[in-house]
Structure formats: structure tokens, C-alpha cells
Image (cartoon, grey):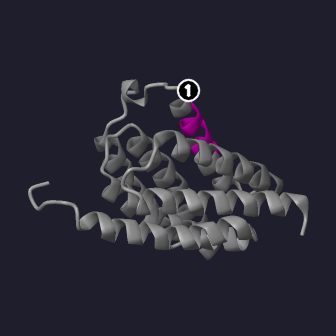
Amino acid sequence: MSVISLIGWFGTLVYLLNHAYITLNQRWRKTVYFTANFVAASALVYQSVCLSSWQAVIINGFWAIVSACLLLDCSLQRIPVKTQHFYTSWVILIGLLGFSAFQTSELLFSAFAWSSAWFFCFSYFLFSAKRISERFYFLCNIYAAIALLPQMWMTENWPVFTLEFIWAGISLMGAIRSTATVHLID
């Protein structure tokens, strides 16, 4: 196994442990969570650049930047991005996915992967800025992880493929678990 691959697997392991950390621990600490995300994201950016796996580079690069900003106590709440922007972009992405469904399977997989990048980045930002609930964040992560799988398979980015497969399961567990704590009035 090459050093590049080991770096990718290391990033995958750190991400998964960290995602399980916020899923299973209701009193998770911001510093632990964002430091681990920064480390994992940086490792996977390096590995994914080496593989020319550009969706994974964008996703993890964005996560590294947001994590670093939060560790440096930058206020994401000042950035004028609203959840309505997320919903509007979601409708546009669904339209683009519908269009690409009539094209080649390669274009369809690429469109799903880019929609995954958008969902991962936008939902991570909104969650980090405390603009969406933990439950909604987990639901977005389920979609984003599954949508990225075909592209990671095609680029043979096995650390990220494994990460996303397990990430979807952990996110499903988190969404189910958070449903038990949500009141119908919410």
C-alpha cells in the first residue's frame, strides 16, 4: 500500500470516528469535532488530489476551511447564507439530475457526485453555523454519501468510497436517534 493510500485511509478512519462521536455523544465538544474534521479533511484532500478525484477534493477542502474557521473562532453566523438558499439550490440540482438522467451513465454519476459535493458543503456550513438541526444535517449526509459512491467507484478512490458507505450508515443511525428527541411541535 502506498503512502498516499495510507494517508487517505487515515483520513477516512478519523472522519468515521468523529462522525460516530457526534452521533453517539449528545455532549460532543466543538473543539474535538472540528479539529478531527480538519485533520481528516486535510488528509483526504491530499489523497484525492493525487487521484484527480475532484468532488472529494472540493468536499474535503471546504470541510477543512470551515473547520479551521470555527477553530479560530470565526463567526459563520455573519455570512448571509440562509436555509432558503439551500432549498432553492436543491430544487435546481434535482432538475439538473433529471436532465443528466437522459445522458450517459458517466454524466449521471458525475452529476450525482457534484450534487453530493454541494449537499455536503452546504449542509456542513449550515450545521456549523447552527442554522439547521442535527437531524436535518444527518438526512442531508445520507443523500450526499450515497450520491458520491458511483463516482468514487469509477475513480477508484477506495478510502473515500469506504468512508461514504459507512458515513451513510452512521448518518442514518444519527437521524433515527435524533428523531426520538424531536417533539411534534418542532
Q: Residue at x 63, y 43 (%)?
A: 38
The quadrant in which the N terminus is found is bottom right
- 82 to 137, vertically: above or below: above
* In-image side of 56 versus 176 (left or right): right
Residue 56 x, y percent position in the rendering: 65, 55
- 79 to 151, vertically: above or below: above
The residue to which callout 1 is attached is 72
Front residue (pair 185, 18): 18
Helix, strand or loop at label 1? It is: loop
Q: Residue at x 37, y 54 (%)?
A: 90
Q: Residue at x 37, y 34 (%)?
A: 81
Q: Which residue is drawn at 71% across and 72% down?
A: 154
Decide whether residue 117 is among the magenta residues.
Answer: no
**Does residue 22 show up?**
yes
- The image quadrant that residue 62 belongs to is top right
- 73 to 125, vertically: above or below: above
- Amino acid type of the residue that numbered disc 1 sits on in the rendered structure: Leu
Residue 130 x, y percent position in the rendering: 34, 40
Secondary structure that dominates the magenta span = helix
Residue 115 x, y percent position in the rendering: 50, 58
* In-image side of 102 versus 136 (left or right): right
Front residue (pair 9, 36): 36
* In-image side of 2 versus 38 (left or right): right
- The image quadrant that residue 180 belongs to is bottom left
**Does residue 103 show up?**
no
Front residue (pair 37, 50): 37
Total marks in image:
1
Decide whether residue 62 is among the magenta residues.
Answer: yes
Which portion, as a residue range, is magenta?
Answer: 61-68
